[in-house]
């Protein structure tokens, strides 16, 4: 196993994945959510757990690219903003 991400980054990244998981779960009750949006969300999220377990100097830029990729396509949730806010304040609010 590689190096674990620094604790603040790990917590922020896990928070974003947590939000993605419960958001997707909630979307199962809303027929109007496009399948493409769900696909794009998990295309952005699926590498994050592995990435934080194999941390390297350029890993945060990769993580942010994943979040930005989703955010460019869809108006919400705003994952990069959530990530940054969690990093800065240690919590989502």
Image: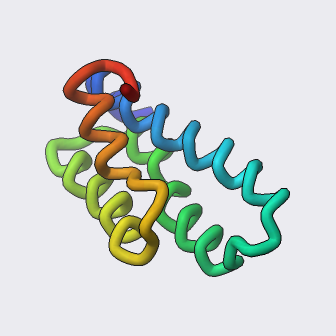
Quarter of the picture holding the N terminus = top left
| Residue 69 image position (x, y, % from top left) | 36, 70
**Vertical order, 5 against 34 (above or below):** above
Q: Residue drawn at (25%, 29%), measured in percent from left and top? A: 87
Quarter of the picture holding the C terminus = top left
Q: Residue drawn at (57%, 48%), measured in percent from left and top? A: 20
Q: Residue drawn at (45%, 48%), measured in percent from left and top? A: 48
Tell me where residue 71 sits by quadrant: bottom left
Q: Residue drawn at (45%, 72%), measured in percent from left and top? A: 74
| Residue 15 image position (x, y, % from top left) | 47, 33
Tell me where residue 12 sits by quadrant: top left
| Residue 89 image position (x, y, % from top left) | 25, 21
| Residue 19 image position (x, y, % from top left) | 56, 41
Describe residue 90's horizontal placement relative to residue 28 as left or right: left
Describe residue 76's horizontal placement relative to residue 32 as left or right: left
Describe residue 42's horizontal placement relative to residue 33 as left or right: left
Describe residue 76's horizontal placement relative to residue 63 as left or right: right
User: Of all residues shown, which one is farthest toward the left?
Assistant: 57
**Vertical order, 38 against 48 (above or below):** below
**Vertical order, 79 against 35 (above or below):** above
Coloration mode = rainbow
**Vertical order, 20 against 92 (above or below):** below
The one nearer the camera, 56 or 24, is 24
């Amino acid at each position: 196993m590689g190096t674990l991400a620094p604790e603040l980054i790990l917590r922020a990244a896990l928070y974003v994945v947590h939000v993605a998981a419960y958001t997707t779960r909630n979307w199962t009750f809303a027929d109007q959510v496009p399948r493409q949006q769900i696909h794009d969300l998990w295309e952005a999220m699926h590498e994050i757990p592995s990435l934080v377990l194999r941390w390297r100097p350029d890993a945060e830029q990769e993580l942010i690219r994943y979040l930005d990729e989703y955010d460019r396509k869809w108006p919400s949730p705003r994952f990069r903003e959530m990530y940054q806010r969690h990093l800065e304040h240690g919590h989502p609010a």
